[in-house]
Image (spheres, rainbow, N blue to C red):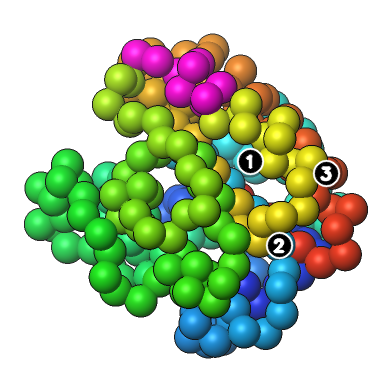
Amino acid sequence: INRYTFSWTGHLHIYCADPNTSYSPFVSRIPHPRRSSDLFRLRSTPVVLMVVDAWRLSHLVDPHSPMVFLREAVLSGQAVAFVANVQTPTVTMPRIKAMTSGVVPTLISLVTNFFATENVEENWVNSAAAAGRRVIFFGDDTWLRLFPKAFDEAEGVTSFFVNDYTEVDNNVTRHLNVVLTTNDWDLLILHYLGLDHVGHSLGGESVEIGRKLYEMDNIARRIFRTVSVRRCFSFLKF
């Protein structure tokens, strides 16, 4: 994913991690890659990456989906949606590595997922920091272990208290009150765990799924409408 991320400005880009590609109206071809280190030399373009753990394509394309803003943004052409076909293992650490460096994880990653250490492979997070960009992160603390030197400001939340699907997200969102009112950052990464925790603790058919999707949609709307007043930006949602 890192090889494509920073080639767009002024749009909302939505990636759905789902092996089901039958929703062809929502799928477009991704342009050719460039090295992530080169992309940061092109121009200063604020980027927001919002990761919603366990979010899948059906959450977006279902006609009755509570994600009204994102669905309407895609259908109106204001947003571009892509399907990211994932491979096992789908646990957090190897998926973050795949998303940031393009490296396909191996089965041994199932074991190392619980002992994440600094990612030494080329990745767009460290490339942004090395290029002098101000990088801010809030969310799953796995990112802090993988990129311990990349963030100018950060606060992590733990992914192992699966019965908590409220405060784990509130502790990410509360930072937006300050971050979205400033212009002193270049890359904002948010990783929400609440949807995944709902699935683990209450099951995939719980009414809390819809409530959590509605919450995430409202956060996406808030970020997009606030950041879009800046001349050039990219908002990426996974």
Amino acid type, residue under disc 3 in the picture: Thr
Q: Residue at x 54, y 76 (%)?
A: 131
Going from the N terminus, do you reach mark 1 or mark 2 first? Answer: 2
User: Which kind of residue does numbered mark 2 sit on?
Assistant: Pro
- The residue that mark 3 highlights is 226
Residue 49 in view: no
Residue 231 vertical position relative to residue 71 in the rendered view, above or below: below
Using a 10 Å C-alpha cutoff, classify the residue at mark 2 as few (fewer than 14 neighbours), some (14 to 19) or many (20 or more).
Answer: many
Please name the residue shown 52% across and 53% down the image: 152
Instruction: Tell me: 44 left or right of 52.
Output: right
Regarding residue 91, the answer to whether it shows in the image is yes
Disc 2 designates what residue? 46
The part of the chain drawn in magenta is: 163-171
Q: Could you say which quadrant of the image residue 212 lies in? A: top right
Q: Is residue 192 magenta?
A: no
> In the figure, residue 176 lies in which quadrant?
top right
